[in-house]
Amino acid sequence: MDPEQLKVLEKDVRRLKRIAAERASELHDLVEDRLPAAYHEIPEIAAATFDACKAWAEARDRLEAVSAA
C-alpha cells in the first residue's frame, strides 16, 4: 500500500472513531438523562452505537494489518 492510501485509511479510522464516540455519547445521554421514560429509544441507539463501534474496529484492524505488512 502506498503512503497516500495509508493516509486515507488512517483518516478513515479517525473518522470512524469519532462517529463511534458520538454514538456512545448519545447512548450515555439516554441512560443519564432520559431513562426510564425514553426506554423505547434503547434498541435504536444501542444498535447505532454497536454498528459504529464495529465499523471502527474493522477499519482499525485493516490499518493494523497493513501497517504490520
Image: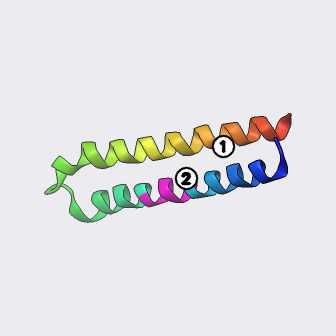
Direction left: furthest residue:
37
Residue 4 falls inside the magenta stretch: no
Residue under numbered circle 2: 16
Find out whether the residues at labels 1 and 2 contact each other: C-beta distance under 8 Å. yes
Q: Is residue 3 above or below residue 26?
A: above
- Image point (26%, 65%), residue name: 33
- Image point (33%, 63%), residue name: 29
Image colouring:
rainbow
Q: Please report the bounds of the magenta region as a residue range.
A: 16-22
Q: Which mark is residue 8?
A: none
Q: Residue 44 in the image: state x and y as whole percent.
A: 27, 45
Q: Is residue 52 above or below residue 65?
A: below
- Residue type at mark 1: give it: Arg
Q: CA distance from mark 1 to mark 2?
A: 9 Å
- Residue type at mark 2: give it: Leu
First in sequence: mark 1 vs mark 2: 2
For residue 65, side relative to residue 61 (left or right):
right
- Image point (43%, 55%), residue name: 24
Q: Is label 2 in a helix, a strand or a loop?
A: helix
For residue 28, side relative to residue 68 (left or right):
left
Residue under numbered circle 1: 60
For residue 14, side relative to residue 3 (left or right):
left
